[in-house]
Image (cartoon, rainbow, N blue to C red):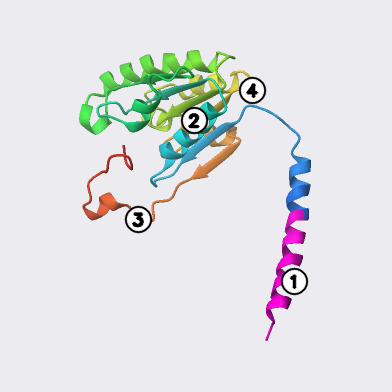
Amino acid sequence: METREERNARHKRAMQRKKTLVDARIAAATQDKGLLLVLTGNGKGKSSSAFGMLARSVGHGLRCGVVQFIKGQWECGEHLLFQNHPLVEFHVMNTGFTWETQDREKDIAAARATWQHAAQLLSNPEVQVVLLDELTYMLTYGYLDATEVLAALAARPPRQHVIVTGRNASEGLIAMADTVSEVQDIRHAFNHGIRVQKGIDY
């Protein structure tokens, strides 16, 4: 049987090998650029992760912009926190979910009006981080022209970071992204009859 000292020595050797590999990867990462991050999948936590990055960016003094599509018919903690922050420009489509509005033409008009705010942020080199929350739905439903949206993302200032959230991210959006994370739904409280909770779900 392996002794404690032998196990500790084996652990140290493994960590030394790992450090060598990690240090090499860090040394090889020499490029600086504005990132396009896509948070997609059917699980909970996409917007939560995105607003965590927004909070981190604000903590570093970066100027940020937020555009929330779909949401807006109820009080959201992230909106309450950032709506009057001097470093954050915040826009909300304010129509609610499409199954609530039940009016496609009205939703399209609201999406296009809201997109104008996003387009302005994406063309402003002074805005360092842009969060486009639930944008994927606007492309999936055809409310916004995908070619126009992808062109705006491609033409943004070179050091500007953009975070896009929502289910079913399009192939074009994924192909353009630098980082893509898929959040999977393993278990969700709502599916077991538990109501949405303040601070956790909104």
SS at mark 3 in the image: loop
Q: Which residue corresponds to mark 2?
A: 54
Looking at the image, do the residues carrying marks 2 and 4 touch, with CB atoms under 8 Å apart?
no
Residue depth check, mark 4 versus mark 1: number of the one nearer the observer: 1
Q: Quadrant of residue 103?
A: top left
What distance separates the C-alpha of mark 2 from that of mark 1?
A: 42 Å
What distance separates the C-alpha of mark 3 from that of mark 1?
A: 40 Å
Q: Which residue corresponds to mark 1?
A: 9
What distance separates the C-alpha of mark 3 from that of mark 4?
A: 37 Å
Q: Residues within 10 Å of mark 4 (few under 14, many from 20)?
A: some
Q: Earlier in the sequence, mark 2 or mark 1?
A: 1
In which quadrant will I find the N terminus?
A: bottom right
| Residue at image coords 38%, 32% | 137
Q: Earlier in the sequence, mark 2 or mark 4?
A: 2
Q: Amino acid at mark 1?
A: Ala
Residue depth check, mark 2 versus mark 4: number of the one nearer the observer: 2
| Residue at image coords 43%, 32% | 136
Front in this rendered view, residue 85 or 53: 85
Looking at the image, do the residues carrying marks 3 and 4 touch, with CB atoms under 8 Å apart?
no
Residue 55 vertical position relative to residue 116 in the rendered view, above or below: below
Image coords of residue 170 (percent x, y) = 48, 35
Q: Amino acid at mark 4?
A: Arg
What distance separates the C-alpha of mark 4 from that of mark 1?
A: 44 Å
Residue depth check, mark 3 versus mark 1: number of the one nearer the observer: 1
Span colored in magenta: 1-19
Q: Which residue corresponds to mark 4?
A: 159
Looking at the image, do the residues carrying marks 3 and 1 touch, with CB atoms under 8 Å apart?
no
